[in-house]
Amino acid sequence: MTERVPTTCMRCAVGCGLVQYPREHGSGLERVRGDADHPGTGGLACRRGIDETVDPNGTRLGRPLVRRDGELVPTTWETALERAVTGLEAARDDGGSDGVAVLGSGQQTNEAAYALGKLARGGLGTRYYDANTTLCMASAVTAYYDAFGSDAPPPTYDDIPDAETHIVWGANPAVAHPVLFRWIAHAVDTADAELLVVDPIESETAAAADHHVALEPGGDVALARAVLARVVETGRVDEAFVTDATEGFDELCDQLPDAASAADAAGVSLAAVDRLTTALESPTLLYWGMGINQSVNGTVAAGALIDLCLATGNLRPGSGPFSLTGQANSMGTRVCSSKGTWPGHRPFHDPDVRADVAAAWDVPVARLPDDSGPGPVGTLESLGDDVAAVYAVATNPAAGMPDATSVRKTLEDAFLVVQDAFETETVALADVVLPAATWGETEGTTSNMERTVSRVRAATTPPAAAKPDLEVIGLLADRLAPGLFEESPTPEAVFDELAGLTAGTAADLSGISYARLEAERAVRWPAPESDASAGYRYYENHATAGDDTAAADDDAGDAWSFPTPSGRARFSTGDTRALPEPPDERYPLTLTTARQPDAYNTGVRTDTDAVPTARLSPATATAVTADHVGERTDDECSQFVQVVSRRGSITVRVDIDEAIPNGVVWLPIHHPAVNDLTLSDVDPRSSEPNFKQCAVRLETPPARETDR
């Protein structure tokens, strides 16, 4: 009988338990199903996670490649590693430690992310190191630190059934996180709860909601401040919580706008504001996603949503702010990788922390950079100046970065080493390609969006000569920084090193081990002891079961403690910035990007149409198609137009869709051509790009484009 191998799905950040069944003959997986024994998901799994685990559609890389005479040709591992090291060392010799940039990924295991960060920071000493998780979650991370002094959501999945209100703001979990949305929908159906969705688009989640607030694109901060103003005006502030557990509320109130004018700025009625205001009186989970984060105002917007929870006392079990993480191990990358903080969320700028990390890694403290770098956009903008070489692991910046045309041009001029499991647009530009293992072929751990660590297990071998990420990183480290790893790094040994380095921190993993994960399957951090697994963060209830006061008052014994200087949660007072590229006469429409079902990131694991499909409202389509539609094929939804921004143009099919607001062009973020249009402006504090909005126009496509 084929052996069953439990693992964790690496498709999104929900962290579903899966069971893998390897093929009896040869490599590969025969089938995959949900794991009924998994303590978090109990057998639930989405179809796309299963399909992309057992049979991804991308083109696998099986042998190392080097560029000769302009072409990528197969070679041996030794030759590829020698070529990679020669190029990276040349860049370091010319430009110092910052001559090499390193880009990681939320697709790596905790162990690989930690090892890559150790090589980048402790081996190479570069400040130009980041991961594609910054493109998704950095604004939420910054807002959490502002409010609580620590990263990650306070609530867990256990709080979903207990919430009486579920507000989903700028996210579409019905598409992006199907199992999580199933829990939300079940809670709404069975617990007399309600679901409200705030989104310019009538998304799949909005279609299932009890109420949909369709604000103007970019109106999130104005709407959140309008709601808070009405919370104050109507006496819905949780005065006891605000007084006992927070600071900065009076200062924020002094800055609040008039609710009616803020509602108008957000493009909604005051009645819609009051609907949200009333909903927040009940225990509320407030979820948000990329619609909030991916903006020049992402940190301010995320902070404004946290403020709503603080003002209404929604920071206890069954309530709270809950950012929905995109990539499978974005949370782990934030804890482990040394990209924005040192392991365990230790502050990057603290010299004592730098000294501790240097001692643990046995490297000179002067080698460690004293700032975390400019983010992925700033890193790639430094190519040709400070940076001459790039080492990219499990990420596809040639398609996934904003203003991707410019990114490709800069990558073409750099020495580029790419480590990936699949052919990508970035692989096509590489000087050296190092083939990697993928899901089902590698060992390690991952961390889901609610802080739970679980095992990732190999059930089969990678194709041909491909190797696990951790092994490849170790091979490069042996050549670039001898002695950085005492021996060839193994997943369990690296995890133990990582966990030890987090001891005593806000993201303490030191009570977690492979043996414990084998026994318990999943453990939520902070876990400082071998029997500790965290629940709701920052909150405790000290009331005892026999306390008459507790029986009379459900809130008796409630207490909060935050890792801030004052021990209190902090309200935000950030200022919004004008949108970097509002529509005008030349570019009268707003482009927004989002996820679609059954498509993976930049499309490397899923089929991608040759031409992406743009969704337009009937009114927008009517206004533009008479002049700009290319040759029709067999139905009205196959009309071709050219979408043009200040940075590039792409040909798209038109899908007329009443769910899209007038004046908006919706495109899937997964298609590798779409980021040719987007702009590289970033949030000034989080460095997260403004993916969700830029100005475009529609034109008639070239005839050859419509002949496909």
Image (spheres, helix red, strand yellow):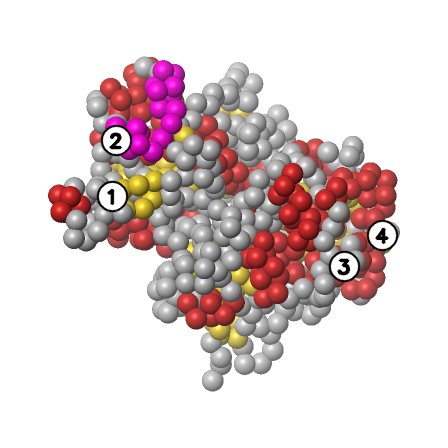
Which numbered circle lies on residue 86? 4
Residue type, mark 3 in image: Gly
Q: Residues within 10 Å of mark 2 (few under 14, many from 20)?
A: few
Q: Is residue 515 above or below residue 15?
A: below
Front of the two marks 4 and 3: 3
Mark 1 secondary-structure assignment: loop
- Tell me where residue 366 sits by quadrant: top right
Write down the residue under mark 2.
Answer: 240
How far apart in space, not on screen, are marks 2 and 3 (Cα)?
55 Å
Mark 2 secondary-structure assignment: helix
Mark 4 secondary-structure assignment: helix
Q: Is residue 143 above or below residue 482?
A: above
How far apart in space, not on screen, are marks 4 and 3 (Cα)?
18 Å
Magenta stretch in the rendered image? 239-255
Which numbered circle lies on residue 483? 3
Front of the two marks 1 and 3: 1
Measured as percent of width and height from the top left, residue 334 is found at 54, 46
Measured as percent of width and height from the top left, residue 242 is found at 31, 30
Residue type, mark 1 in image: Gly
Q: Residues within 10 Å of mark 3 (few under 14, many from 20)?
A: some
How far apart in space, not on screen, are marks 1 and 2 (Cα)?
13 Å
Please count the marks in the image.
4
